Amino acid sequence: MLAATLDAVLAAIEPGIGAIAALPVADTLWRGPEGACEALVDRQNLWRAQTPQGFVFSDILAAHRRAQGQSLTDDAAVAKAAGLTVRLVPGSDAAAKITTEADLIRAESQLRQRLTDVRVGTGFDVHAFAEGDHVTLCGLPIPHHRGLAGHSDADVGLHALTDAILGALAAGDIGQHFPPTDARWKGADSAVFLRHAASLVTARGGVIAHLDVTLICERPKIGPHRGAMQARLADLLGLPLDRVSVKATTTEKLGFTGREEGIAAQAVATIRLPEQE
Ligand code: MG
C-alpha cells in the first residue's frame, strides 16, 4: 500500500513539478473560537497533506534556500512558496506522519503488532579445553586454568546463540555463514557471528523476542559471571535485560563436561517476523 503511494509520487514528479500524497478530508470541519461551533467548513476540495512528498532535488533545495526565515509547515508549502507546481496523488492511512513522541510510540506499536510470525530456533555447541589461562563465554573473558580450543575465540555460548537465531530464520548454521576453513575467522570475536545473525532478523523486518542460553560445565563456575554475561549479551544486541537469559548447569561429573574435557552450550532463540503477505 505504501509502495503504491511512493510509486505514484515518483511517477508524478517532473522538473518544476513536485507531488505529495494526500487524503480527502473525511471529518466534518467546524470553524469557531475555542468551545464554540460557529461555521461549517465546506470540506469539498480539502485535502490532508501526507508524506511522502517528492521533488526534483535541485528544485526543492533551491526552494528551501529561498524559504529561509518563513514559517512553512511542509515541503509542499516550501515548493509552492517558490512557485513550483505541486500535484496531489492518493495517499494512504498507513502513511501516518511521525511528528510528536506520541506518534512515534503509536508507529512502533503498530510495527510490533505486525510481527505475528513467531519462530523458535535451537543451537548447540561444544569446545574442548586446551592450553590457556581463560575461556571466553557469552562475550566475556573468564579466568580459568585452561582455555578452549577453536578456530575463533571458541565462545560456546555465543556460537549456540548464533545457531539458535539462524535456526529460527531457517538460514543455515554458523559453519555455513562463517566457515572454519576461512582464515578471516581465525581467533575472531564471536560477537561478530551473533551480531550477523541478529542483523539477518532485522533485515527481515523482525525482532529478537527472547534468547536463552545454558552453559554446561563443572568449571569455571558460571554463577559469579552470570549477571555480567546477561548484560554483555543485552548490550551486544541492543536488547533489554529481561529478553536475555543466561543459565548454567553441571552434568553431575558425568560425560565429557563432567570429566572437564570441554564446555557445552545450548540455546533457544525466539524471534518475531512480519506476517508474510
Ligand atoms: Mg563453536
Image: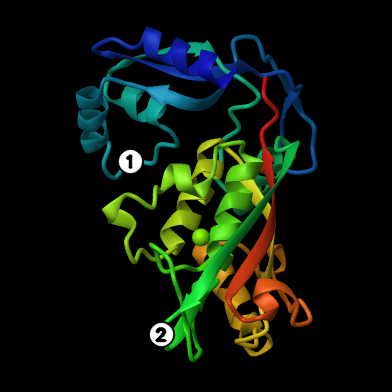
**Residue designated by label 2:** 132
Asked whether mark 2 lies closer than 8 Å to ligand 1, one says no
What residue is shown at x 57% (from left), y 17% (from top)?
A: 91
Q: Is residue 208 above or below residue 152?
A: above
Residue depicted at x 23% and y 12%: 15
Quickly name the residue at label 1. 70
Q: Locate residue 263 relative to residue 254 in the image: left or right.
A: left
- How many C-alpha atoms fall within 10 Å of the one at disc 1: few (<14), some, or many (≥20)? few
Q: Is residue 63 left or right of residue 80?
A: left
Q: Residue at x 72, y 68 (%)?
A: 242
Sequence order check, earlier mark of 1 and 2:
1
User: Could you tell whether 95 is left or right of 189 in the image?
Assistant: right
Spatial separation of the CA atoms under disc 1 and disc 2: 68 Å
Q: Amino acid at mark 2?
A: Gly
Q: Which residue is at the front of the view, 53 or 249?
A: 249
The location of residue 148, given as percent across then percent down, is 47, 75
Residue at point 43% right, 33% down?
Answer: 74
Q: Residues within 10 Å of mark 2 (few under 14, many from 20)?
A: few
Secondary structure under the numbered disc 1 in the rendered image: loop
Query: Label 2's element?
Result: loop
Disc 1 vs disc 2: which is toward the camera?
2
Residue 236 vs 11, above or below: the answer is below
In percent of width and height, residue 191 lies at 45, 63
Q: Where's residue 204, x and y in %?
A: 55, 35
Disc on res. 235:
none
Mark 1: amino acid: Gln
Q: Nearer the viewer, residue 22 or 242?
A: 242
